[in-house]
């Protein structure tokens, strides 16, 4: 599989422009035959002039009969922005239903949870496809603790004795890498075993890694590690979990502890990580 050039910033910028400029006027409108043409024309104004109109039209026509909600509009904008190369080649960009062929998919790790699988200790990665055929799907992949350590250097960490040593899989949150998705493993969702990272991804990752490894100071002035912090990336770009934790009594350790609002388990974060 050949790795294509990729810029996450360019994809995000194009995605936001498509949503705010081309699609927002159609929010809550029912996508009909005439509306498809109008949406197609407005989207074309935001894309390179080499994009195939027929491919774009077919990419939008799949929504015929649907009332365009805000989430659906954002998903469409991201799917188109992450697959400009296909639209230029005249290939419609449709919602993911199956993995037709092996593919290198740029992903961003949105959150990570400890997990055991077949008596093996590891972590469940929730990966957002930020480009490619499954964009912008969120899918999960189990990665063993040993594999996490092995891929850390690929993603931008240094050797253990270097300035950016890897210490926890939680440090992978919001980092970018290329997931080598295999069609033979991808049944209900994309699945991968191999990861790589471009030089651009490593540079972007390193900006977060430097703070998480305290090669650069915490912007909040905290002394504790990012992996021990209650602040989520809803408030801090260097955080390693999505939503800031809340404090309540833990039934397991019978002490006040931090709880992830998105986690339904009746254990505080400390108890969960100490398992």
Image (spheres, grey):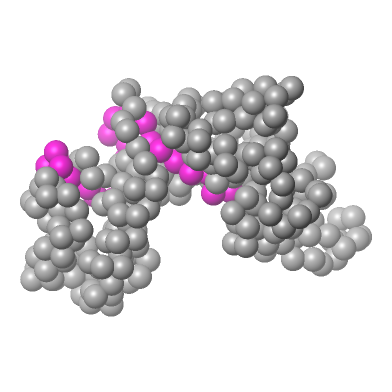
Q: Looking at the image, is 50 positioned above or below residue 25? A: above
Q: Looking at the image, is 256 positioned above or below residue 107? A: below
Residue 204 visible, this angle? yes
Which quadrant of the structure image shows residue 256? bottom right
Which quadrant of the structure image shows residue 112? top right
- Which residue is pictured at 85% across the width and 65% down the height? 249
Residue 186 horizontal/vertical position (percent): 40, 34
Q: Looking at the image, is 175 positioned above or below residue 72? A: above
Whether the magenta-drawn stretch holds residue 79 is answered as: no
Which quadrant of the structure image shows residue 275? top right
Residue 140 horizontal/vertical position (percent): 51, 42
- Which residue is pictured at 74% across the width and 22% down the height? 161
Quick check: 37 left or right of 195? Answer: left
Residue 111 horizontal/vertical position (percent): 58, 48
In the picture, the quarter occupied by the N terminus is top left
Residue 81 horizontal/vertical position (percent): 29, 51
Q: Looking at the image, is 145 positioned above or below residue 245? A: above
- Which residue is pictured at 91% across the width and 60% down the height? 254
Q: Nearer the viewer, residue 11 or 185?
A: 11
Residues rendered magenta in the picture: 87-111
- Which residue is pictured at 24% across the width and 49% down the height? 94
Identity of the residue furthest to the right in this view:
254
Q: How many marks?
A: 0
Q: Nearer the viewer, residue 254 or 54?
A: 54
């Amino acid at each position: 599989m050949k790795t294509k050039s990729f810029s996450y910033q360019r994809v995000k910028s194009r995605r936001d422009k498509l949503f705010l400029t081309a699609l927002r006027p159609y929010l809550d409108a029912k996508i009909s035959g005439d509306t498809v043409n109008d949406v197609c024309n407005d989207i074309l104004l935001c894309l390179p002039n080499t994009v195939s109109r027929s491919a774009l039209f077919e990419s939008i026509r799949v929504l015929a009969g649907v009332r365009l909600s805000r989430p659906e509009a954002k998903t469409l904008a991201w799917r188109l922005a992450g697959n400009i190369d296909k639209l230029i080649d005249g290939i419609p960009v449709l919602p993911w239903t199956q993995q037709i062929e092996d593919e290198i998919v740029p992903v961003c790790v949105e959150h990570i949870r400890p997990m055991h699988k077949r008596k093996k200790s590891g972590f469940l990665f929730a990966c957002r496809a930020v480009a490619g055929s499954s964009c912008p799907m969120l899918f999960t992949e189990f990665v063993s603790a040993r594999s996490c350590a092995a891929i850390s250097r690929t993603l931008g960490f240094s050797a253990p004795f270097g300035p950016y040593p890897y210490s926890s899989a939680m440090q992978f949150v919001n980092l970018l890498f290329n997931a080598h998705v295999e069609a033979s493993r991808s049944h209900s969702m994309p699945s991968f075993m191999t990861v790589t990272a471009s030089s651009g991804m490593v540079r972007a990752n390193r900006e977060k890694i430097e703070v998480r490894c305290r090669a650069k100071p915490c912007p909040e002035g905290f002394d504790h590690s990012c992996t021990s912090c209650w602040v989520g990336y809803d408030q801090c770009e260097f955080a390693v979990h999505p939503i800031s934790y809340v404090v309540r009594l833990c039934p397991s350790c019978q002490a006040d502890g931090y709880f992830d609002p998105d986690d339904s388990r009746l254990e505080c974060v400390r108890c969960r990580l100490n398992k």
